[in-house]
Amino acid sequence: MSFLWGVMGGPSAGPQPSGAETIQKLCDRVASSTLLDDRRDAVRALKSLSKKYRLEVGTQAMEHLIHVLQTDRSDSEIIGYALDTLYNVISNDLEEEEQDDSEEENLTKVDDLGSQFTEIFIKQQENVTLLLTLVEEFDFHVRWPGVKLLTSLLKQQGPQVQQIILVSPMGVSRLMDLLADSREVIRNDGVLLLQQLTKSNAAIQKIVAFENAFERLLDIITEEGNSDGGIVVEDCLLLLQNLLKNNNSNQNFFKEGSYIQRMKPWFEVGDDNCGWSAQKVTNLHLMLQLVRVLVSPTNPPGATSSCQKAMFHCGLLQQLCTILMATGVPADILTETINTVSEVIRGCQMNQDYFASVNAPSNPPRPAIVVLLMSMVNERQPFVLRCAVLYCFQCFLYKNQKGQGEIVSTLLPSTIDATGNSVSAGQLLCGGLFSTDSLSNWCAAVALAHALQENATLKEQLLRVQLATSIGNPPVSLLQQCTNILSQGDKIDRRGSKVQTRVGLLMLLCTWLSNCSIAVTHFLHNPANIPFLTGQIAENLGEEEQLVQGLCALLLGISIYYNDNSLENYRKEKLKQLIEKRIGRENFIEKLGFISKHELYSRAAQKPQPGFSSPEHMMFDHEFTKLVKELEGVISKAIYKSSEEDKKEEEVKKTLEQHDNIVTQYKKVIREQDQELEELKQRVTTLMSQNEQLQATVTQQVSQIQQHKDQYNLLKVQLGKDTQHHNSHGDTFQMNGIQTEEVSKLKEELEEWKNKHELLQGQIREKDFLIEKLKSSQLEIGTTELSSQSSRSGGLEHNNELQKELEMLRSQLQLQSVEISQLQTENQKLRVMNTTADPVLGDSGAAVANSSELEGQLEQEIKELKSEVKALSEEKESLKQHLDSSSSTVAILQDEKSKLQQEVAESKKEQDDLLVLLADQDQKLSALKIKLKDLGVPVEDEDDIESGDQGDEDEDVEEEEQD
């Protein structure tokens, strides 16, 4: 342990070893020692020496430290020491902190040293994979140094380490778990690690995003207090920028996951905006940049448009406009907010309309556009802020013909406020256009050019604008005033670059005259314009003036290309001849090429936002560069064309114009027909809906009518009952001539039915008499011939069936007699009603009023009587059938009687034989009866039994005769 004591700085005897020797001995101790404690102490000593002797420890101990990581995984302490040592060797952060700013050479050496050690470490990909497994350990002393070491490796050799982690199984997913660590130190360093991991690698960015990174990062930002949070919020925002910038897939995933809505609370600043901390300014600046990443003009148009709409619907745009109009906001935050609002509304009609409606909290309220333009033309405002306002105005007018019309309308004579109480946007632009500040001239010219961009109608309307130059002088058109200032540019004392003012005015005139023949005619109508342009182009000026010469050549070329030859002195052919004589075609084309060859032109063509380092570099506008690309080649061809070619081209143009006119007419007709179709469709839909409503009302009314009918019938019945209750039995009916005839007919039918009924009863009596005779004869035969009962059982059963049928016929006759009695009673009632009908008609006036109802009831009762008569006739038919069946049964019985008589004769022969047997049986029976009497059992004599049975039969016969 004396060796380690000497290394750690304690006193030792003898000469002190050098650093390299000490490190070599420690490395040998790590490699050869069998005790874990000795190896741990040696690694700890290497860690303490690694900051001072970085090169020696890195070259001699790296291999041993990697071996420790592989073999001593069970001991977290030695693993932690080894990771810390490797971090000190590879990382440049510690060396950079100790170096002074003057020692740049040492810094480059330090960078090279860290990069070399990183290459040595990642040469074996297994080392990075081993480090990923160590980062998974939950032990703080292992996980935290592992995260720091992996972050340092990514800083030194980012693409190589990214590729190793990407091909490693679950490599990115392991690192994503760091964001869920409850220890803030590891979580925060995990955010820094993911920052380095996601730099310029779209594949890893997608994996991290789909591992729920957005949700976790937004949760951390919310937990830390949004914009009021610390540096952790800044790190999370930087990581979000890495994931979203130039990554369309992640941007779409961010929008589809409704994460844009979670950005709104970031911009909820209070009313008291004084005393912003530096960290809050940084956080809010990064938040605004993150919004701009989602709506950047370089993104696909569809993705940008969907994000813009989502920001409007969730209230994010409204919140940004609140910051825009708030007081006390720092200048850099205000500038970035203006740029952010610009890109949120760019090309989105919905957002542009909302921005046009925003008012500043002033008295009286002013539109936000007017307030911003006031800042743009105010030379005391910061240059960056004025550029941001110009960009905002350009984005507001981009693909917004409605906004362009509103701006131009503020310049027209009919809409200018004569009182002068309020300042309009057009007045501010004109004021900036003619001020003595060259930057204001340029910004106002470019802003006005954007109001005319791709809108021929507004270009024509702007020709009506008249300006009052001085008292007593007639007003001058805006076009004329622009050319006057352009020609007098050197004479006017201006602050700033004089070239800048002339470039701005020339860009405005080129935009105004392009694709507008009427504006070209107005421009050519001023005889001083063409000589001024040819003079500027023909002169040999310095480098600064070359840009003006190129723009003058472009304006002259536009005057030729879009010339409709309406002015005789300035026809196309004459202007070409003028160029050839005074300038020369080759010289003209060369001067025209000065524009696209200029360095500032190529800068402006890169992106829509004006990105100028100083006001002197503010020369070209992005949209104007597109116009130059479009017209440069066309004008060059037009200059070299002959008069015949021009004529042919004019004829072609005329035919094309005619064709276009025809097409526009047809389009107009089609549009009108479409409108008519739409109107007819709407009418059809309205008529169908009205029809459905009417059908519904009809069905409802039908149901109501049916209900009223039912109620009416109930009232009729109740009224009939009431009249029966209050009046006599005959007062309810009124008989007319037709009803009396029907009653008489019913009486006759009843009489006929009575007669038929009596005849049927007589026939039934005769049949009954015959049946009784047969029964009596059968009974006599039965008493005398007891021995033959078994043979005659079938005949007796048949007789019983006949008796049952007879009973059924009797019951039916009784029912008929009851119904006939009912009919008789009803007939008597009708007679009484007939007799009492006349006095009732004379006495009661109310009965006359209810005659129709009573007649209906009477008709219903007549129908019921008819149905009853019909039922009686059917019963008559059934009775006839029964009589026929009974007559057949009588014939059958007579046949059976004859058979029985034959059998009786035969039985008499056998009777003599049976008499002997009967005598013996009588003796035996008498003996048995005596015995029974002796035993006390009551025994009836046969004479008594037979007399009793005979009496019962006589009583039955008498009852039948009475019936």
Image (tube, rainbow, N blue to C red):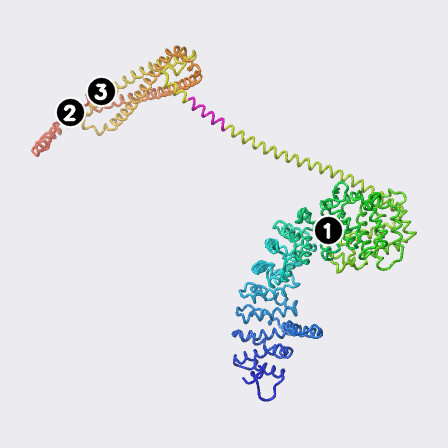
Task: Answer with mark 2 or mark 3, whichever residue precedes in sequence.
Answer: 2
**In magenta segment, residue 710:** yes
The magenta-colored residue range is 703-716
Task: Please identify the dominant SS of the magenta region.
Answer: helix
Mark 2, other Cα within 10 Å: few <14 / some 14–19 / many ≥20: few
Quarter where residue 729 is shown: top left
Q: Which label belongs to residue 124?
A: none
Q: Secondary structure at mark 3?
A: helix
User: Is 917 positioned to the left or the right of 51 in the image?
Assistant: left
Question: Please, which residue is most extreme toward the left here?
Answer: 934
Look at label 2 and name its amino acid.
Answer: Glu
SS class of the residue under badge 1? Answer: helix
**Vertical placement of residue 42 versus 553, above or below:** below
Alpha carbons under labels 3 and 1: distance apart = 134 Å
Residue 49 found in image quarter: bottom right
- Nearer the observer, 705 or 472: 472
Distance between the alpha carbons at the discs numbered 2 and 3: 20 Å
Q: Position of residue 846 (x, y in %)?
A: 42, 15
Q: Name the residue tied to disc 3.
A: 959
Marks 3, 1: nearer the viewer: 1
* 572 or 327: nearer the viewer: 327
- Give the mark nearest the N terminus, 1 or 2: 1
Q: How many marks?
A: 3
Whether 107 is drawn above or below 465: the answer is: below
Percent x, y of residue 65: 58, 76
